[in-house]
């Protein structure tokens, strides 16, 4: 069912429900295509209008509803396309660059990453504390999914709230990744987007770093703010670093020197955010 038809059908259904039940007494029963639907929040008659839960109605009609916490928004997508975990595993094994993967904890989502009304697959697997893989698949002209990118990232979180330039169809999505090794653990944020089928990592910054070597310990905490209010799109990023002396009996961390905070400005050059003196 095409998006316009689904949205039209949804609106017509709500109008019919409101018209039919405008003067009904509470409680209000909800029927979709002749089937009674039970909802967590019951339909209500408020000021001569019938109020029904949009998620229940939309999902019953095969429309995807997602709460976007970062943007504080409800996102409704009329795409009814679906894919199974087994199908994604088959895609990874057929097109991935490795001979084998650990895919028991594979997570995935169908989402329109680039605003072209075609759904991409994003998928992530976890192989250890700092090990994992990240994949993006996009549909080709024949409707088959093709691998766009594969990264050796353990992705612990992804989100789709950032819009860099609507007029240029650049929609940033956020990945929080974890890397490290012996004595080192780093959580980073990566802002990425798709452009004409190409995966681009526009910026990467440190969110949290723990590092210990013998009796020296370092902790770094970072953050960023994306500013898109004018054509000179920037990221303001900051990192605060504190060094410690490690004592083992009993275990204790003693600060060494003053806490230091550095701020860096990155300017969007049309493809990526690069260091700027301005």
Image (cartoon, rainbow, N blue to C red):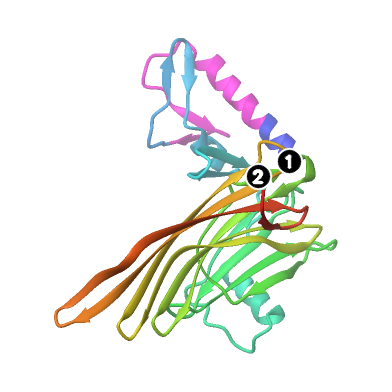
Per the image, the residue denoted by label 2 is: 163
- The numbered dot on residue 218 is none
Q: Residue 28 sits in which quadrant?
A: top left
How many angstroms separate mark 1 from mark 2 (CA)? 7 Å
Which corner quadrant holds the N terminus?
top right
Secondary structure under tag 2 reads strand
Can the viewer see residue 222?
A: yes
**Residue 62 visible in the picture:** no
**Residue at image location 62% in from the left, 54% down from the top:** 173
Query: Is 95 placed left or right of 209 in the picture?
Result: right
Q: Position of residue 241 (x, y in %)?
A: 41, 64
Q: Residue placed at 67% from the left, 74% from the top?
A: 91
State the extent of the magenta-drawn residues as a range.
Answer: 9-37
Give the number of callouts.
2
Q: Residue at x 66, y 43 (%)?
A: 78
Residue 151: x and y in percent read 63, 74
Element at label 1: helix
Q: Is residue 29 left or right of residue 58?
A: left
Which residue is painted at 57% across and 83% down in the image? 101
Q: Nearer the viewer, residue 273 or 99?
A: 273
* Residue 54 within the segment the image draws in magenta: no
| Residue positioned most to the right | 141
Q: Residue 16: within the magenta?
A: yes
Q: Which residue is mark 1?
A: 166
Residue 160 versus residue 143: which sits nearer the camera? 160
User: Could you classify mark 1 by the number of other residues whose Cα lies within 10 Å: few (under 14), some (14-19), or many (20 or more)?
Assistant: few
- Is residue 44 placed above or below 113 in the rendered structure? above
């Amino acid at each position: 069912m095409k998006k316009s038809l689904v949205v039209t059908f949804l609106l017509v259904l709500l109008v019919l429900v409101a018209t039919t039940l405008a003067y009904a007494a509470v409680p209000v029963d909800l029927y979709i295509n002749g089937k009674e639907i039970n909802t967590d929040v019951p339909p209500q008659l408020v000021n001569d209008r019938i109020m029904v839960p949009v998620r229940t109605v939309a999902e019953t009609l095969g429309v995807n509803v997602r709460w976007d916490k970062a943007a504080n928004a409800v996102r409704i997508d009329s795409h009814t396309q679906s894919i199974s975990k087994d199908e994604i595993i088959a895609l990874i094994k057929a097109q991935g660059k490795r001979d084998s993967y650990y895919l028991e904890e594979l997570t995935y989502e169908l989402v329109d990453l680039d605003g072209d009304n075609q759904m991409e697959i994003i998928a992530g697997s976890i192989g250890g504390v700092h090990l994992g893989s990240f994949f993006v698949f996009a549909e080709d002209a024949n409707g088959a999914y093709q691998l766009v990118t594969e990264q050796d990232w353990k992705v612990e979180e992804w989100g789709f709230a950032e819009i860099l330039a609507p007029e240029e169809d650049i929609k940033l999505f956020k990945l929080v990744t974890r890397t490290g090794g012996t004595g080192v653990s780093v959580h980073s944020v990566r802002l990425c987007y798709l452009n004409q089928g190409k995966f681009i990592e526009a910026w990467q910054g440190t969110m949290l770093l723990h590092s210990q070597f013998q009796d020296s310990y370092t902790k770094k905490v970072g953050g960023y703010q994306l500013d898109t209010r004018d054509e000179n799109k920037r990221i303001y990023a900051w990192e605060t670093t504190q060094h410690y002396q490690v004592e083992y009996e009993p275990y204790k961390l003693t600060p060494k020197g003053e806490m230091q905070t550095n701020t860096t400005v990155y300017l969007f050059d049309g493809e990526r955010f690069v260091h700027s003196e301005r």
